[in-house]
Image (cartoon, rainbow, N blue to C red):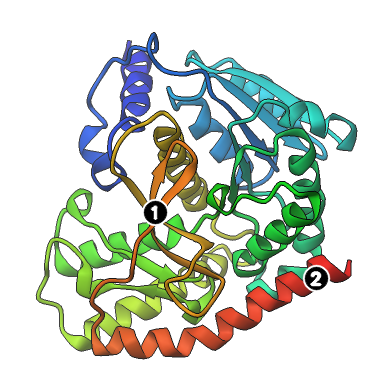
Amino acid sequence: MKSSLLLRSIRSSFTNSTSSISTHLTRRGYGTESVPERKVAVLGAAGGIGQPLALLMKLNPLVSRLALYDIAGTPGVAADISHINSRSEVAGYMGEEQLGQALEGSDVVIIPAGVPRKPGMTRDDLFNINAGIVKSLCTAISKYCPNALVNMISNPVNSTVPIAAEVFKKAGTYDEKKLFGVTTLDVVRAKTFYAGKGKIPVADVNVPVVGGHAGITILPLFSQATPKSNLSDEEIVALTKRTQDGGTEVVEAKAGKGSATLSMAYAGAIFADACLKGLNGVSDVVECSFVQSSITELPFFASKVKLGKNGVEEVLGLGPLSDYERQGLELLIPELKASIEKGVKFANQN
């Protein structure tokens, strides 16, 4: 009985806004009769992020079919998760020859595939391996489900999103409204750290995070955080630095045995849920994401995005920035520009 209540409780949490998700964990019951059929594919589902992400998507009542793909190990993951008594039907696919089956008919494709960051590695060190993986997966997406919303988790996101865009352009399937770099973990961290320092209930906190998804390109806008907290300038600087270094904090704490997998899976599930809500016509769904953008001089930029039935409905502006945030914006632009150009160059030369 307790496990049934817990499952229903977790399911219901996905149907509420991400900013107050924790306050709704005790709500029970969910009717699926009027919910559209939606297929979600997870590419890299047997990995450190992929497995908990697959679990969370299995618990999401908006998902009717869940396709789990990886180069190995997927049948076991799929069998395990398929025993959970929630709405979606689960199928596992393994190896390149089954990638098309995994993708066909997908409404949302989530890509956590790739190698994790190890101690001493920067996100840039991951580039050559993960860039090749992303390019091949996106080539398949353009063939088998060109209209799907693509949620890019594979690092370095600042480069892998431009790679995906170039692959889709070459295939003639690029739609800037349907390609997202998942930067939700930066938002999750900013909310958590801000709430802890300000002694505010974390479920009430919202903090926009803009820029990119690595180091100084991550710019949390604590001046726009709600509810307001009387934090000093020094505390804001420290919170910004901690948000930017959140991934390194986890890598070092795991002492060579992994990177941020569980929190990333949670963040990925939150963003995928927002995409599904947008597809289903839920109004006022807003999340931060790294998308094609004209709000700065850069072709891609993370900011608040309104989601709708076609993906990006509107890319929202930065709003008023503090002097410290304006300085941070100036500093991140050259680094983010270089990462974007690196991705474009890789896609066009390989």
Q: Is residue 220 left or right of residue 151?
A: left
What amino acid is at disc 2? Phe
Regarding residue 318, the answer to whether it shows in the image is yes
Is the residue 348 above or below the residue 268 in the image?
A: below
What's the residue at 34%, 22% (across, down)? 6
Depth order, front residue of 4/275: 275
What amino acid is at disc 1? Glu
Residue 18, quarter of picture: top left
Residue 41, quarter of picture: top right
Q: Nearer the viewer, mark 1 or mark 2?
A: 1
Q: Which residue is mark 1?
A: 314
Q: Which residue is mark 2?
A: 346
Disc 1 secondary structure class: strand
Is the residue 294 above or below the residue 308 in the image?
A: below
Residue 242, quarter of picture: bottom left
Q: Where is residue 128 drawn, in percent x and y?
A: 80, 69
Q: Compare marks 1 and 2 and give the one earlier in the sequence.
A: 1
Is the residue 242 above or below the residue 102 in the image?
A: below
